[in-house]
Image (spheres, rainbow, N blue to C red):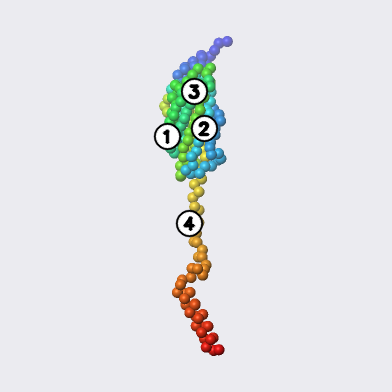
C-alpha cells in the first residue's frame, strides 16, 4: 500500500517534535495528610503536611532533565524535607526553608524501568489574614525549560482559615456588678452615728419612767 506523501511528511514532523520536545511526566498524588485535620485551621496554628508524589513517565525517561519540579506553600516560616525515592531507596534528600523548593529534573530523570517518587514534608504557621480567607498548605507543579507550568501538572492542598475576630457591635468589656455593702465594710463614722442615735433613744425612754 502506497503512503500518501503528505501523511509521510506529517509522521516525520511528529517524530522530530517528540525528539526535540521531551514528553511531560504525570505527577500522580499518593497519600496526602494535613495535621491538624479538618477543612479549616485557626490563624497562627502550626500545620504539618506530608505527601507522596508518584512520577509516571510518558516519554523516554521518568522526568525531563530540562524540566523542574516546583513545590510551594503559603505557610509562614516553612521548613521542608523533600526526599527523592528510586526503586524504594533514598536517592536525594533536600532540606529547605522558605516558601519555595525547586527539584532539578536531573534528580528525577531515570530510565522508564525505574520507579521514581518524591516524599514531601512541610511545616509552617497559618498566616493571620490570608488572601481570600484560605491558605495554600502545599502546591506542586512541573515547570518546563522556560519556567512555565506544564498544563495539567498543578496540584494544590488548601485549607480555610478561621480568624475568630469579634463580631461588630459585640461588647468589648463586661461591667462587673456592684457588690452589696456588708456590715464589715460599713465606714466607721456611719456606725458611730447609728450607735449615738440608739443611745439617745434609750436615754429618752429612761427619762419618761
Horizontal and vertical percent position of residue 83: 48, 26
Tell me the element at label 4: loop
Choose the circle earlier in sequence order: 3 or 1.
Answer: 3
Tell me the element at label 2: strand
Is 21 placed above or below 95 here? above
Outermost right residue: 1
Q: Which residue is mark 1?
A: 98
Tell me the element at label 1: loop
Q: CA distance from mark 2 to mark 4?
A: 40 Å
Q: CA distance from mark 3 to mark 1?
A: 23 Å
Q: CA distance from mark 1 to mark 4?
A: 38 Å
Horizontal and vertical percent position of residue 164: 50, 48
Q: Are marks 2 and 4 in contact (CB under 8 Å)?
A: no
Q: Are marks 4 and 3 in contact (CB under 8 Å)?
A: no
Q: Which residue is mark 4?
A: 172
Residue displayed at 45% across by 19% down: 20
Is 126 placed above or below 182 here? above
Mark carried by residue 90:
3
Choose the circle earlier in sequence order: 2 or 1.
Answer: 2
Q: Which residue is mark 2?
A: 50
Q: CA distance from mark 4 to mark 3?
A: 55 Å
Tell me the element at label 3: strand
Mark carried by residue 153:
none
Horizontal and vertical percent position of residue 5: 51, 14
Horizontal and vertical percent position of residue 140: 48, 31
Q: Is residue 195 visible?
A: yes
Q: Give the side of residue 107 with respect to residue 36, left or right.
A: left
Depth check, mark 3 against mark 1: the one in front is: 3
Choose the circle earlier in sequence order: 1 or 4.
Answer: 1
Choose the circle earlier in sequence order: 4 or 3.
Answer: 3
Residue displayed at 47% across by 41% down: 126
Amino acid at each position: 500500500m502506497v503512503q500518501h506523501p503528505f501523511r509521510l511528511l506529517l509522521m516525520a514532523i511528529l517524530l522530530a517534535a517528540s525528539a526535540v520536545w521531551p514528553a511531560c511526566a504525570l505527577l500522580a498524588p499518593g497519600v496526602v495528610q494535613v495535621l491538624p485535620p479538618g477543612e479549616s485551621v485557626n490563624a497562627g496554628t502550626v500545620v504539618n503536611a506530608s505527601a507522596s508524589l508518584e512520577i509516571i513517565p510518558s516519554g523516554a525517561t521518568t522526568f525531563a532533565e530540562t524540566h523542574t519540579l516546583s513545590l510551594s506553600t503559603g505557610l509562614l516560616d516553612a521548613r521542608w524535607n523533600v526526599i527523592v525515592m528510586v526503586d524504594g531507596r533514598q536517592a536525594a534528600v533536600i532540606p529547605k526553608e522558605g516558601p519555595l523548593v525547586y527539584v532539578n529534573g536531573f534528580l528525577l530523570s531515570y530510565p522508564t524501568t525505574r520507579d521514581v517518587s518524591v516524599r514531601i514534608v512541610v511545616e509552617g504557621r497559618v498566616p493571620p489574614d490570608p488572601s481570600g480567607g484560605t491558605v495554600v498548605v502545599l502546591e506542586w507543579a512541573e515547570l518546563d525549560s522556560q519556567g512555565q507550568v506544564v498544563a495539567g501538572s498543578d496540584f494544590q492542598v488548601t485549607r480555610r482559615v478561621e480568624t475568630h475576630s469579634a463580631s461588630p457591635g459585640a461588647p468589648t468589656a463586661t461591667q462587673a456588678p456592684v457588690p452589696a455593702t456588708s456590715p464589715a465594710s460599713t465606714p466607721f463614722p456611719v456606725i458611730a452615728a447609728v450607735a449615738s442615735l440608739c443611745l439617745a433613744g434609750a436615754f429618752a425612754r429612761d427619762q419618761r419612767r
